[in-house]
Image: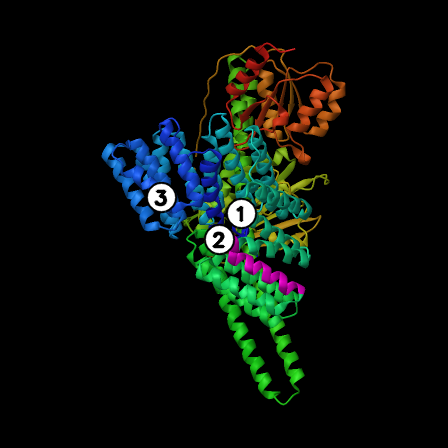
Amino acid sequence: MKVRLARVGNLRGFAAIFFFMAFLLSGLLLGAPVGAHASILPTPLSERLGKLEKLGHTEPVAAIEQLREIDADSATSDDERRETKKLLFDMLMRTDRRAEAKEQVAGLRALGERNHDRAATVLSLELDATVKKFEGDSDQGAAVIEKAIALAIAAHDDDLVYETRETATAIYLDMGQFPAALTHALAGLEVLKGETPEIRRRRAVALDLVSQIYTSLKDGKMALDYNDRARAMMRSAGDEYVEGFDIDRGDAYALLGDTDNARKAYEDALAAARRRSSSKRELIALLNLANLVREEKQFSLCVRYAQGGLRLAQQVQVSEYLYATEVSLGLCHIDIGSVALGQGEVARGMEGLRKAGNMPDLESAYGELATAEENSGRYKEALEALREQHAIAESLYRSDQSRTMAQMQARFDAADRQRKIELLEEEGRTQAEELKNKNLERSLVGLTAALVALIAFVAVREKEKLRRAAHKANLDKSQFLANAAHDLRQPMQAIGNLLEAARHAFTRGDVAKSEELVLAAQGATQIMRSSFNSVLELSRLDAGALTASYSEFDLAELIDEVRLSMLPLAEQAKVQIRFRRSRKKCVVRSDRHLLARVLFNLLSNAVKYSDARKREKAVVIGAIALGSSARIAIVDNGIGIAESERENVFKPFFQIGNPGRDREIGLGLGLSIVRSIVDLLDGHAIAMHSTLGLGTRFHVDLPRTEVRPGIAQEVMIDMPDLDLAGTYVLYVEDDSLVRSSTEALLAEFGVLCDSSKSYEELSGKLPRLERMPDIVLTDYRLSEKHTALDVVAAVRTEFDAGIPVILLTGESEGFSPPQELGEVTVLYKPISASTLLEQIRRIVSAPRGG
């Protein structure tokens, strides 16, 4: 059981630790109360509130009484009273005096209504959302905090926006909605403006929170990247990073399987916590070390760390850590063979967790206990622990209001009920068998029972693995959709560049060039539209939001329309599409639009996966009447599909030969959409036959009967002329569509553009260049795990000069370039062509330093 467990496994603990970090940041690092606006509070009261905030961590009762006196004092201004109530609320919540904390929320609400004070109103909503989160009503808390965020944004108050975003992050973490939490955490970062040491410290803690969220999303690489940035930011503020950063770093390394670096990070956190006398952080570090060395089977060391943690937990009297530490120590004792001692410690710790209502940690503890009992050969006990874990897991899943988790729970419940029936039948057979053989020797009976327990344990363990795999698949899907959204920026960038180049060519009177560029822009528009529509269409089909609109029409007409729409793509791929018409007119009953989508996707797939090694690449589509039904056949002589991959081709996001998710091949949703549409349409069916290296045949069967067939579009732009003729740009971009469109745009304005599709290609060019470039224009993330860092380093080394750099990146706007790049101009895709050209003009016209 990880008890930092709280950070990754336990969503409620994760949110609680986040609030602790917010308190630490506001009070201990800045010496000011949470939410305090330094520009509003008079210095004497600001200093007094800062001292009371610190006092609240050691003597909360005394601090609360003094805060009540300030609140009751008629000389206290409304601004001062608002900040006092906020700090009072924080302390009451920390000391579990929730009813009194609610009184402060009501007081703030009244203050806002009485004085039309929007800041007080927003603050009351934020604190109300916090209370709802702690009371287990995170859905209501989310609704309230979203309202608070909207009011804070309308008030143009960055402090309020940041605080409400903080609270929203914690609430969504508590609900397990990590993508939403990440969105609010990044949005909060954007409003942390200014370069004072205090702002830098706050930004460092916010960056570390993003690192924690990526850890929960199982993205160790991004978690490590944001942790690095948090540490660098804290150092830039002239301060050593807090020990929590090292704990988060250890979590990221552990996720990546790098136990050596994880252990070093936890040990650094332990040393820093002891230097700062931070008992809670010291305890968390000890627990994480105990868990880590236990996984490495260093059981004696595990006992030492866990015993140190238990002594500390008893000393500081923090119940949630005390119970978790007892469980951890007990597991270590079981592992070294002190089973009775260990089981007693685990039982005490679990009872404490149960009484405290900490069911997520309790569920995790039972899972770890099952593993420990299994490793020691006690299969019956392991099975009992695993059944307890399942019971708690079911309860936790039922309380989750997320639609995705609810759907997963329904599937989990169905599988679990079936498995329980099977287990009951199996137990019944076992009991009957035991009754028949009760006269056998006791040793044989014991062996039979042990074997039965082992079989049942393995079966239940397999079910647990399936449940975890389903949960992981859901997270993978969320991550993939985020990546797909990133890729959609590429054609948007290309469209802007191509249309600007077309406008410029038209004003020069070069109509042919203008037409060529507009056609290319239309191609990029189609790619973007297709990607957007694929994601939207699949989600609507999965949700049952699409219904079929049936009509009767000539099948040959529809096939001809789809075939003609595919010809440009086929000609580009040098693939012939042949239509074998039936001699008899074939009228079918279907949804014309949805059937066209099915045929388009199947033809598109056949063209995309044509075999480049074959001299004649062809796709044949035909239709025949089969009594009361019709059959459409699409046959290609492409690369074919291996037998091991055939069962996956209709799954969302699956693509043959596209592990890198090349956007030009697509998102891997085409055949999944085909299957979903065919399942939706009455009387329709699809089948596939394929031979690797020879090709693939798809059949679509649909109802026959008797007749009928219609669309349009537009575009526009504007920009001043710029004198960029002769400017020499060294350009690196791995996306061919963005690269070619940008080349066309720059060429139209007289820019000499030397482009490369990869770092490797650039490296080969550099020694042969006869002129130093005026600007380096590059994407940030390139193929083969290279980045702009590699590009800039190579160019600056080759020319021994600080050449200006423009990063044209598809990263989100929360992205900050690494400090090693130095001064760079960052532009986020998609940008207008005019913006890109204006930035180039600005850089080349600026005086160059020696």
Total number of numbered labels? 3
Q: Report which residue position mark 3 lands on.
A: 64
Q: Residue furthest bottom?
A: 439
**Marks 2/3: CA–CA distance:** 20 Å
Residue 43 lies, in percent from the top left, at: 38, 27
Is the Cβ of the residue at disc 2 closer than 8 Å to that at disc 1?
yes
- Our reading of the magenta stretch's main secondary structure is helix
For the question of whether residue 631 can be seen, the reply is: no
The mark that comes first in sequence, 2 or 1, is 1
Instruction: Point out the stretch of residues depicted in magenta.
Output: 314-336
Under mark 3, the amino acid is Ile
Residue 796 lies, in percent from the top left, at: 69, 20
Under mark 2, the amino acid is Val
Find residue 318 and name its label.
2
Under mark 1, the amino acid is Ser
Say which element carries label 1. helix
**Marks 1/3: CA–CA distance:** 23 Å
